[in-house]
Image: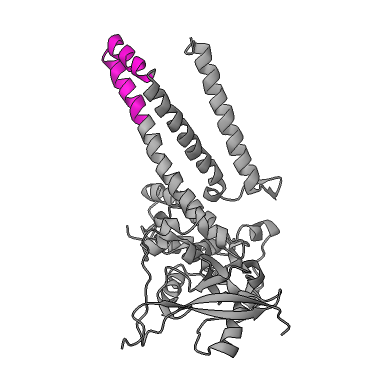
Amino acid sequence: MKANSTYVRPMGAWWRRNAFYRSYMVREASALFVTLYAVVLLIGLLRLAQGPAAYDAWRASLATPASIAFHVVVLLLVAYHAWTWIAVMPKTMPFVRIGGRRISDRTIVAFGAAASIVAQLACLALLAWLGWTR
Amino acid sequence: MDASRTIRIECLRYDPETDAAPRYQAYDVPFTDDMSVLQGLQYIKDHVDGSLTFRWSCRMAVCGSCGMMVNGTPSLSCETFLRDFHPAGLRVEPLTHFPIVRDLVIDQSDFLRKLEMVKPYIIPADSKTPAAGTHLQTPRQMDEYYQYAQCINCLLCYAACPQYGLTPSFIGPGALALLHRYNADSRDDGRAQRMEVVNAEEGVWSCTLVGYCSEVCPKGVDPARAVNQNKINSTKDYFLHWLMPRPGVSR
């Protein structure tokens, strides 16, 4: 007989308990792909420092089918990761008021998403202007 | 009771005097469309098994006593309805992440200790007595804290927070939301006294913004927002303390 002891349930595989936790884990895991892409760019920078031949070899390696497939996967996961940041934006800020009225969380998220899309279009336009897409 | 339907309620049972670990026991409960999960449990206690133990008081989502896991979701059993689980049935467990005292009753003393730590009361700047008049507040000043003041200490947010489950020293969503409730009140001057709790590893920095706390909150408190905007306050406090050391607070 055990006298007056409480029971603490184990936490094992808690992320499998519901869809909310699973999407949280996907959100956190998608950060790894942001890191992977940063590493790819960092390698590019190192190769650039080594001279034109090394840089061209790095660019050629990016054009292989395996690399393109990798980039498509990374693009999707980084886009998802970015979206999760925008989606939690209202949780990270004090109430915002315009003309005495509180701005709704949905408006904040919509503004964040719109700002992100505008910034990305601006980047693409800049690249096009620089002739990167030649 | 005019019940034409029956539903199976599976309850977690744990008797600390005889059980080494919890077990499940199923009860068939006749129910009507307007019966809550809490009423289902009360039916069991009154008519089937008087040993089933659970907490409840107001039956109308005000007291915060009857929080339980209903099919794995932290819920107030008084505002969760049996009809929504028919015909599959439901499983009722005590709030997760807390030690089980008996059956559906958890030990909330850890939360109560943390609640004391955040000084959940107004610490006024002046020593104005009620005789000297009231502290005036505009509707906008009230709006800054009102939603956080709706907390009923039901602990659903703690049951939703895996970080609390993994790191029980975490002050947790509910107490931090109440901390923010008083910091955000224009009549309060206790922010400096509460900053030590905010800044600690067990304070806001143990939160990884899972966000499920705000999802399950029955009162729309949005504890995740209270916690995460205080990460900004904590960061500001950290950098400002180099410029303006706080009197009487050692670091």
Observer-nearest of B94 and A108? B94
Q: Which residues are magenta?
A: A38-62
> Chief secondary structure of the magenta span?
helix
Q: For this rendering, which residue is in front, B180 or A66?
A: A66
- Is residue A42 in the magenta section? yes
Query: Can residue B62 be seen in this snapshot?
Result: no
> Quadrant location of residue B196?
bottom left
**Quadrant location, the N terminus of chain A:** bottom left
Q: Where residue A125 sits in the image (x, y, percent)?
A: 55, 18
Vertical order, B49 against B221 (above or below): below
Give the image location of residue A27, x and y in percent: 46, 45
Q: Is residue A24 left or right of residue B134?
A: left
Rendered view: B129 above or below A57: below
Q: Position of residue A66 (x, y in %)?
A: 37, 24
B75 in the magenta segment:
no
Q: How many marks?
A: 0
- Colour scheme of the rendered structure: one colour
* Residue that appears at 60% across and 42% down: A109
> Residue B159 or B108: which is nearer the viewer?
B159
On screen, residue B14 versus residue A116, left or right, reads left
Residue at point 37%, 20% (across, down)? A62
From this viewpoint, which residue is outermost toward the left?
A50
Residue at 38% x, 59% y: name it. Answer: B247
- Residue at 46%, 36% (x, y): give it: A77
